[in-house]
Image (spheres, grey):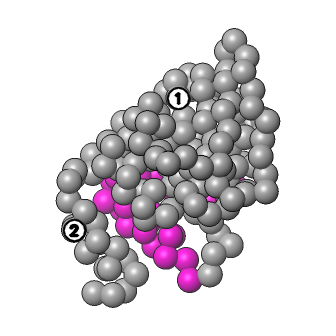
Amino acid sequence: MKSVFVTVGTTSFDELIAAVSSPAAEQVLRSRGCRQLVLQIGRGALQPAPQHGPAFVRDVFRFKESLAEDLRRADLVISHAGAGSCLETLEEGKPLLVVINEKLMDNHQLELARQLHKDGHVLYCNCSTLVETLQSMDLSALKPFPPGQPEKFALFLDKVVGFE
């Protein structure tokens, strides 16, 4: 797991950025072989300083035209539970750890993460359990998401949010 990509999409999720860039989380990531942590911080107020050392690199940016290259380079993606971010990551075939934003009302993100986890495609946690999850996670247990079937994902979303 040399490279970890963290994305909050177009929103702000400072709690996730704070949790994943904390000394405890970065230490666990390094102990698991991470040499590069890339943080996409969106509209967040928290902007950790970039770090470029010989053993560990932390890159930080707000937005890019496309996250496709960051996703391709990542050995693990840590993401908010936005449907677009989850689908893009799963279609790229990358291991995904979804972090729930517990401050959201009517938390469809939690329902989405639970269902994707139940189906074996993702791991999920909240900000307070992120370090523990990083320590104990077994990425080899994740099942690939069937590629190229966005209509199935749309039906799945409808079921999760109760439109079916």
Residue lying furthest top: 54
- Image x and y of residue 1, in percent: 49, 27
144 to 75, vertically: above or below: below
Q: Amino acid at mark 2?
A: Glu
Which residue is outermost to the front?
A: 65
Name the secondary structure under disc 1: strand
Q: Residues within 10 Å of mark 2 (few under 14, many from 20)?
A: few
| Residue span colored magenta | 106-130
Task: Please report whichever mark, 1 or 2, sits nearer to the chain's N-terminal start.
Answer: 1
Instruction: Give the left or right position of residue 61, taking residue 51 as reference.
Output: left
Instruction: Quadrant for residue 34, please give it.
Output: top right
Image side of residue 46 versus residue 13, left or right? right
Amino acid at pointer 1: Ser
**Residue at 67% of width from left, 15% of height from top?**
55
Residue 36 % position (x, y): 60, 26
Q: Residue at x 33, y 43 (%)?
A: 92
Residue 59 part of the magenta-drawn span? no
Tell me, yes or no, whether the highlighted magenta stretch contains residue 118.
yes
Number of numbered labels in the structure image? 2
Residue at the (22%, 67%) spot, across then down: 152
Q: Which residue is mark 2?
A: 151
What percent of the width, then of the height, locates residue 82?
49, 64
Residue 61 at x, y = what percent? Answer: 65, 42
Position of residue 108 in the picture relative to residue 61 (left or right): left
Q: Residue at x 37, y 77 (%)?
A: 160
Q: Is residue 130 visible?
A: no
Please identify the quadrant where the C terminus is shown: bottom left
Residue 54 figure quarter: top right
Residue that numbered label 1 is attached to = 3
Judge the density around disc 1: few (<14), some (14-19), many (≥20) Cα neighbours within 10 Å.
many
